[in-house]
Amino acid sequence: MQGLLTELVQSIIDMPGRFVDVALADPLSAILILFGALFVGVASAVFGYLSLGAFFSLFIRPGSGRSPPQEAQ
């Protein structure tokens, strides 16, 4: 188990260098890596924004939002 954890940490440390090697090998590879990072970054930012909004909505007074619609009599 310790060897697996060590290999995982070492591969995380080595990844930026490998990404640079792949990006410098071909201009198309650099564009693909850039767009992949952009898509992941935007998705993470949107998810983080929604998660923070849900978290902070827990602390807002319940009566401060819109009330549910009234049922017709």
Image (tube, rainbow, N blue to C red):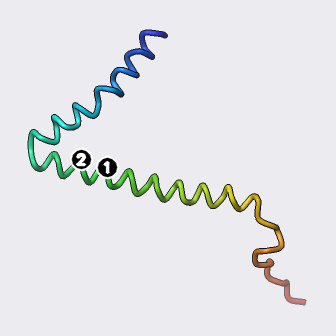
Q: Which residue is mark 2?
A: 33
Q: Residues within 10 Å of mark 2 (few under 14, many from 20)?
A: some
Report the residue at 40% width, 22% height from top: 9
Of residues 71 and 65, the one nearer the viewer is 65
Report the residue at 31% width, 49% height from top: 37
- Tell me where residue 32 appears, x and y as whole percent: 21, 50
Of residues 68 and 3, the one nearer the viewer is 3
Q: Split into 4 quadrants, where in the image is the C terminus?
A: bottom right
For the residues bearing labels 2 and 1, Cβ distance under 8 angstroms: yes
Residue 58 as seen in the image, left or right of residue 37: right
- Tell me where residue 15 appears, x and y as whole percent: 29, 31
Q: Secondary structure at mark 2?
A: helix
Type of amino acid at the residue the image marks with label 1: Ala
- Tell me where residue 43 appears, x and y as whole percent: 43, 55
Q: Secondary structure at mark 1?
A: helix
Q: Quadrant of residue 63?
A: bottom right
Q: Which mark, residue 27?
A: none
Residue 18 as seen in the image, left or right of residue 27: right
Q: Which residue is mark 1?
A: 37
